[in-house]
Image (spheres, rainbow, N blue to C red):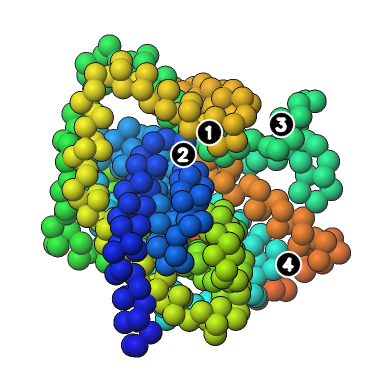
Amino acid sequence: MDLILSGLADALTPLSLLAIVAGTIVGVIVGVLPGLGSVVGVTMVLPFTFTMPQVPAIALMLGVYCGSVYGGSITAIVLNTPGTPQAAATALDGYPMAARGEADLAIGWVTAASTLGGLFSVLVLIIAAPYLAAFSLNFTPIEYFALGIFALTCIANVSRGAMAKGLLSGLAGLAVATVGTDPITGDLRFTFGSFEMSAGIELIPAVVGLFALGEMFVRAKERWRPENTATFRVGFRLPPLRDWKPRIGVLLRSSLIGSFVGALPGTGAATAAFLAYSEARRSSPRGDKFGTGEPDGLIACESANNAVTGSALVPTLALGIPGDPVTAVMLGALIIQGVTPGPQLFNNHIELVYAIFMVLVLVNLVMFATGALGAQAFTRVLRIPEPLLIALVIVIAMIGAYGVRGNMLDIWVALAAGLVGAGMRFTGFPVAPMVIGMVLGPMIEQSLRQGLLITRGDFLAFFERPIALALFVLTLLFLVWPLLRDMRARARRRAQEASDEA
């Protein structure tokens, strides 16, 4: 308790509070603007931390980190354009809810779920950091491969009604993920002699193109049709408690998934969001409504991706291994501040560790206030005339795509992805499976190749690892269960029809 109070006192100093508030607001703005993302946001404020004390410097970066993950959900809801890759799953139910006039309620759901998921991960971080860090050491490339295959079951869950097209879309995403340098041999693949292509297809320009530009191209074609213009309610509205009660299980399960995935180095919030969305769609009694504006989908992906923000610090602080690209930047900042993350951190800098815990609590509370008070301002973009809005989103998206690496190739990637995204919308191909394939592809390929090196090419040896075997079994169950459920439903219908005829 003394350590918690000491950490709270460090987090409540005027400079730390200023850093928390400023960082969170900047983070939300960065998340709202398509194409920027958490890494860009944290990198932008990194130079300001060099002359700051330890706790305010870390508070500024954590504020940007958490705020940007949440901010991406706002544009996912109101424009069907995820501001960050982590919010790609949010658009699946957020935009349909906004299209039927409930944008304010959708923002209320994601703000509350993001805050609760973030606070949950802080609790996990405080209680279980040493244990989670130790368990994550059991994950070899074989376990990471099994986790990636398990995550691919999301494709089946987000493709109901267009399963064949969804699978083709997912395969296309996996294929795009192979462009560039082979992670094991260093050979160039599908670069067509272009040096710029050797680094692969950057995820952010591709996601910006598929979602932002694709949506804008479709709007540009259909904007003269009044029947296609949705009426949005601008603002912020918290859902009543009676609507939360049947969804507490979804919130807790998704927060647990996010906390677990975040503690595994190199996975990230996008993976957690799709995993939680898939699990919620499978287990929720309202799973058949996912994709039509079901709050369970918003709760699942937003509580999961924000739970990652806290638990991603577990391997960063306890092992010195970044949990995702953002914590990799923060790891460098900690070293610049004279703090060496690793097993000795909890012995040598325990006060700083608890100050980080308390900063995360305050960041999530400030994030909720920012969402509640600033939703009106953020969603005023919807009142801009649609032709101007389309032009504005395209310009911001192109700036965001270019700003990731400062590479003209990313502009062309975004434009090409935008045309592909528009074509997929017109032909009924779901976009989300392609993004899932692009997000999970590099991890799956690298883990498979490394795992085969470990087992000397024996793939069957993967099934001798208990954790990997459990994940493979879960994957099989997740794929078979919907088929069994549909078969049972058809059998019940036939029995009912026979009973009615009798």
Q: Say what amino acid the circle numbered 3 marks.
A: Met
Question: Which residue is drawn at the image coordinates 34% and 88% (left, top)?
Answer: 2
Give the alpha-carbon distance from disc 2 to disc 3, as whole Å. Answer: 21 Å
Identify the image quadrant of residue 282. Answer: bottom left
Q: Which residue is mark 2?
A: 36
Give the alpha-carbon distance from disc 3 to disc 4, as whole Å. Answer: 32 Å
Give the alpha-carbon distance from disc 1 to disc 3, as whole Å. Answer: 17 Å
Q: Are marks 3 and 4 in contact (CB under 8 Å)?
A: no
Across and down, in percent, residue 362 comes to 30, 65
Vertical arrangement, residue 468 with respect to residue 494, above or below: below
> Which one is in front, 429 or 46?
46
Which label sits in the foreground, 4 or 1? 1
* Secondary-structure class at tag 4: helix
Sequence-first tag of 2 and 3: 2
Give the alpha-carbon distance from disc 4 to disc 1, as whole Å. Answer: 40 Å
Q: Are marks 1 and 2 in contact (CB under 8 Å)?
A: yes
Tally of numbered discs:
4
* Secondary-structure class at tag 3: helix
Crowd class of label 4 (few under 14; some 14 to 19; many from 20; radius 10 Å)? many
Q: Assign the N terminus to one quadrant of the image.
A: bottom left
Q: Which residue is mark 3?
A: 197
Q: Which residue is mark 1?
A: 403
Across and down, in percent, residue 396 comes to 42, 28
Q: Say what amino acid the circle numbered 2 marks.
A: Leu
Which label sits in the foreground, 3 or 4? 3
Q: Say what amino acid the circle numbered 4 marks.
A: Phe
Sequence-first tag of 3 and 4: 3
Q: Which residue is mark 4?
A: 462
